[in-house]
Image (tube, grey):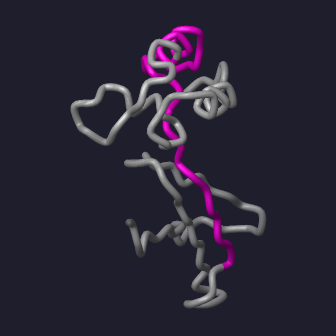
Amino acid sequence: MLEGFGLQASRDVEIMPGDWFILDYKAMEVGQCEVVLIDYGVSFYEPVSVHLFSHVPTRDFDKDGKVCLVDFARLAGVWKVEVSADPNDPNPQYDLNSDGKVNVSDLRLFFGHWLDTAM
C-alpha cells in the first residue's frame, strides 16, 4: 500500500480549474484498489474524490501485447482443468475468476477483453 504520495506543481506554473494529470502505476497483484484524492487547500481530512477499481488478471497469456486467438488456444488447452494455489501448478493464470477451475465463467471473462491491446 502506498500512502502519503503527493503531487505538487512548480511555483511558477499557474494551475487553473479543469487542469488534469495522469497517475500511472504498475499493479503488483490482482485485487481491489482505492485511490483517494485530497486537496489540502480544501481540507486535510476530507477527500475531494475517491476512485475504486479492480485489477484483473491479464488475458494476454503469451504476453505479445494483444488478446487474440493464440491466447484463446492456451485457455482452451486447459479447459475443464482444476487449478490450485500450488506454485508448481502451471495453470492458475487461466482461472480468471479464481474459483479453482477453468470453465465457461473464465471464458466469459476472457472474451470481455477480446482483441484488447496493451501498450
Query: At 57% from the left edge and 52% from the top edge, which residue is drawn?
Result: 54
Query: At 44% from the left edge and 39% from the top edge, which residue is drawn?
Result: 100
Vertical placement of 29 versus 93: above or below? below
Q: Does the magenta stretch include residue 61?
A: yes
Vertical placement of 47 versus 64: above or below? below
Give the quarter of the figure containing the N terminus. bottom left
Residue 119 seen anywhere in this rendered image of the structure: no
Q: Is residue 63 magenta?
A: yes
**Is 48 or 93 nearer to us in this picture?**
93
Residue 19 at x, y percent in the picture: 71, 61
Residue 107 seen anywhere in this rendered image of the structure: yes
**Is 77 or 53 nearer to us in this picture?**
77
- Rendering quarter of residue 15: bottom right
Query: At 51% from the left edge and 49% from the top edge, which residue is drawn?
Result: 24
Vertical placement of 29 versus 16: above or below? above
Give the quarter of the figure containing the C terminus. top right
**Is 24 or 66 nearer to us in this picture?**
66
Residue 83 at x, y percent in the picture: 38, 33
Residue 79 at x, y percent in the picture: 50, 19
**In this rendering, position of residue 98 left or right of residue 16:** left
Q: Which residue lies furthest to the left in this view?
A: 88
Q: Give the range drawn in magenta.
A: 48-75
